[in-house]
């Protein structure tokens, strides 16, 4: 199955809600489909991952796929094994400076929050300070608690108490791994921004007000056109060489355009945009999480400021 | 050395740097025109590196043309007359001129001994060129032109211009526009300057019964609209707008470093210009692969040019009232470059298609709106 088959107009409505899980410890909305899509994606992983990320973003498809790709740069895993990144202790932590973890005799003690799909994956990649630890989820010493977030994602708090792990010093490797992960996430955000804009443009063509389609209004059309150009500019940036600066730049700008596109999507759909029947609200919900997944705008600007001062 | 490195080395040479320093020392309202530097570049075939060698170029591609523009602007060499002469008029002739027109004009344009400008805008029409009124009446086998063009640039320094005139009235504005090559130093052509807030003035060109032979027609008769829409695209990559914005931002960043006022906002603007640069080069690659993108080039131009305002606002935050001092005042930061850019700034959202025209092209071409 090709990527474009996987992310086509028929599958996208299903994919957009595939990451959802009932509150608490409930089962995923469609567990079988989750597994099948992820397996199909893994099989087509020889394709351009940035392109795949953009398509995933357009579908708002949530899965451990991109985390698994990033983790494999530090701990190569056997095919089919999935990994979730565990980079934060607090919501305000920046993935560029993960809070320390305690490692003793190959065993890890730490708390990590906002870990996506922690209960689905095989392993966690826990990064703290200059250390990375690959921790199997299903073992004594690993406890996961479901969080409940606006994006209806599958986020968890993970408590590790002397959990067995493979441990590596990543002082040299982590900045590059993070940069490439940010580029892929930026591609995901650009995909979501452009999809929100297209969804809204389609609505404006159908919705009539004051005797004509809303699409005829330059005030509305130009706002979407400006956002589309912003998204394309970030897309072009994603195609440049990844390094810590371009990674931070791309994810900063992509987060901003994804958030603004989602805001406009809800607004330009009117009250309908706030209802469960309309995907505009799904973009809006997801943007609140995805836009700051690799750092808040404040954190990212601060990182870039440090780099600028050294340039 | 590759082409860019050769150009960079040449532009860093003492005689070019002396000429640039001379331009920087000009008073606030001084305008540059035909530069000696253009002649030096022209002698090497570098003014139009992407043109065939038989027309005075080097037979290279759009990437080298873009590299030249970037290096000129980064080195402080104004590119406006070069862009008009080579990038627009030369491009029109190269793609749609007759063999005789190419032989007659392209080598002279490429070596910088002849300069050309553009006469499209009129007092009553700017972005809406379908409403232009300049008229070309058949006169024997030739044409006689009457009309007024305004807000064009560098016409006082140029030898000839590409002029859009109406050759028939069918009731459909886009139909019946024809492009002519007009000699600017000729009886029947009156060029005057219109003072502007920026250092570069506009010109008004009154064409009063100028007679042209049929050889002056560029492209098909009555088909100027199609030509303007398809060929302006070839110049609109955003490369020049990005480079101008980058030079300004780097000046502002240097001021911020010197005053200890580097800010997160500047870091974000730096990131945004990196995106503008990437998007502009995507358009250059599209041209090199012979698949120009109307929507893409509109996005590249819009995105780059929209950053002048936030950069200028950031400059004001860094230098406060000092940022308002002109180059005439010895205390002006960056020798008045910020003040000068503030006055020139609005033109960048207007030139080569206004921001609104770019948004129209994106909304219609990319999103199917309007």
Image: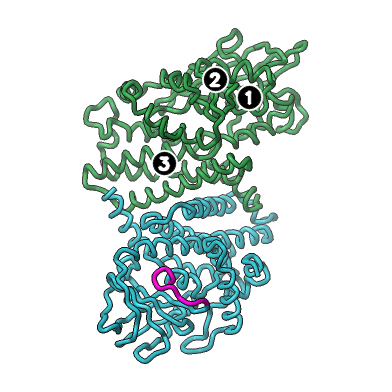
Chain colours: A cyan, B green
What is the quadrant of residue A40 in the picture?
bottom right
The residue tagged with tag 2: helix, strand or loop? helix
Residue A234, can we see it? yes
Picture layout, residue A35 above or below residue B214: below
* Picture disc at residue B308: 3
**10 Å neighbourhood of mark 1: few (<14), some, or many (≥20)?**
many
Badge 3: chain ID: B
Q: Position of residue B17 (x, y in %)?
A: 33, 25
Picture layout, residue A299 above or below residue B244: below
Predominant SS along the magenta part: loop
Cα–Cα span, label 2 and label 1: 11 Å
The residue tagged with tag 3: helix, strand or loop? helix
Q: Residue at x 63, y 12 (%)?
A: B208
Q: Residue furthest top?
A: B187
Q: Which residues are magenta?
A: A72-79
Sequence-earlier tag: 1 or 3: 1
Q: Position of residue B331 (x, y in %)?
A: 22, 31
* Picture disc at residue B342: none
The residue lying toward the viewer, choosing from B199 and A290, is A290
Badge 2: chain ID: B
Cα–Cα span, label 3 and label 2: 31 Å
Badge 1: chain ID: B
Q: Residue at x 33, y 45 (%)?
A: B314
* Picture disc at residue B93: 1
The residue tagged with tag 1: helix, strand or loop? helix
Q: Position of residue B292 (x, y in %)?
A: 61, 41
Q: Residue at x 39, y 76 (%)?
A: A125
Asked whether the residues under marks 1 and 3 belong to the same chain, the reply is yes
The residue labelled by disc 2 is B109
């Amino acid at each position: 199955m090709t990527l474009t088959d996987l992310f086509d107009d028929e599958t996208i409505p299903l994919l957009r809600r595939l990451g959802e899980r009932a509150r608490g410890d409930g089962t995923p909305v469609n567990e079988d489909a989750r597994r099948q899509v992820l397996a199909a994606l893994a099989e087509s992983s020889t394709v351009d991952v940035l392109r795949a990320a953009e398509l995933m973003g357009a579908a708002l498809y949530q899965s451990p796929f991109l985390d698994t790709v990033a983790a494999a740069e530090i701990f190569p895993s056997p095919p089919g094994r999935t990994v979730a990144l565990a980079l934060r202790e607090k919501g305000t932590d920046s993935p560029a400076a993960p809070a320390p973890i305690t490692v003793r005799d190959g065993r890890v003690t730490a708390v990590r929050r906002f870990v996506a799909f922690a209960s689905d994956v095989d392993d966690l990649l826990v990064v703290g300070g200059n250390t990375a630890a690959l921790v199997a989820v299903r073992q004594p010493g690993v406890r996961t608690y479901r969080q409940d977030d606006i994006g209806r994602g599958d986020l968890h708090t993970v408590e590790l108490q002397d959990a067995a792990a493979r441990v590596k010093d990543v002082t040299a490797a982590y900045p590059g791994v993070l940069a490439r992960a940010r580029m892929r996430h930026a591609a995901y955000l650009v995909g979501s921004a452009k999809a929100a804009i297209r969804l809204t443009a389609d609505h404006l063509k159908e919705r009539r007000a004051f005797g004509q389609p809303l699409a005829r209004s330059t005030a509305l059309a130009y706002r979407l056109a400006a956002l589309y150009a912003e998204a394309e500019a970030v897309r072009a940036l994603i195609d440049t060489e990844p390094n810590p600066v371009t990674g931070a730049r791309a994810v900063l700008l992509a987060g901003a355009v994804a958030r603004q596109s989602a805001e406009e999507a809800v607004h330009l759909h009117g009250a309908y945009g706030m209802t469960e029947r309309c995907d505009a609200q799904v973009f809006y919900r997801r943007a609140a999480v995805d836009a700051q997944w690799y750092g808040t705008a404040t954190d990212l600007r601060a990182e870039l400021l440090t780099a600028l001062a050294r340039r | 050395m590759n082409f860019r490195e050769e150009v960079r080395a040449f532009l860093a040479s003492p005689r070019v740097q002396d000429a640039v320093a001379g331009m920087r020392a000009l008073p606030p309202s001084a305008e540059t025109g035909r530069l000696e530097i253009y002649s030096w570049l022209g002698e090497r075939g570098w003014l139009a590196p992407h043109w065939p060698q038989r027309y005075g170029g080097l037979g290279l591609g759009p990437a080298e043309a873009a590299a030249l523009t970037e290096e000129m602007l980064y080195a402080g060499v104004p590119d406006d007359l070069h862009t008009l002469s080579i990038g627009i008029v030369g491009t029109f002739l190269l793609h749609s001129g007759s063999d005789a027109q190419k032989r007659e004009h392209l080598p002279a344009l490429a070596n910088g001994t002849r300069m050309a400008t553009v006469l499209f805008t009129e007092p009553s029409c700017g972005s809406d060129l379908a409403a232009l009124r300049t008229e070309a009446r058949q006169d024997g086998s030739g044409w006689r032109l009457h009309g007024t063009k305004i807000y064009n640039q560098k016409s006082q320094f140029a030898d000839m211009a590409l002029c859009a005139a109406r050759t028939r009235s069918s009731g459909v504005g886009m139909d019946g526009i024809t492009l002519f090559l007009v000699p600017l130093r000729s009886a029947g052509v009156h060029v005057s300057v219109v003072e502007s807030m920026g250092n570069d003035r506009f010109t008004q060109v009154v064409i009063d019964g100028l007679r042209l032979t049929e050889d002056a027609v560029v492209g098909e008769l009555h088909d100027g609209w199609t030509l303007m829409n398809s060929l302006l695209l070839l110049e609109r990559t955003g490369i020049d707008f990005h480079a101008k914005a980058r030079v300004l931002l780097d000046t502002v960043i240097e001021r911020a470093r010197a005053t200890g006022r580097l800010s997160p906002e500047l870091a974000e603007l730096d990131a945004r210009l990196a995106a503008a640069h990437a998007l502009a080069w995507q358009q250059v690659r599209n041209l090199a692969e012979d698949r120009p993108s109307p929507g893409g080039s509109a996005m590249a131009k819009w995105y780059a040019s929209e950053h002048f305002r936030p950069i200028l606002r950031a400059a004001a935050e860094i230098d406060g009232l000092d940022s308002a001092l002109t180059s005439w005042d010895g205390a002006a930061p960056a020798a008045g470059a910020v003040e000068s850019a503030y006055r020139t700034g609005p033109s960048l959202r207007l030139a080569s298609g206004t921001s609104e025209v770019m948004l129209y092209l994106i909304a219609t071409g990319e999103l199917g709106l309007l």
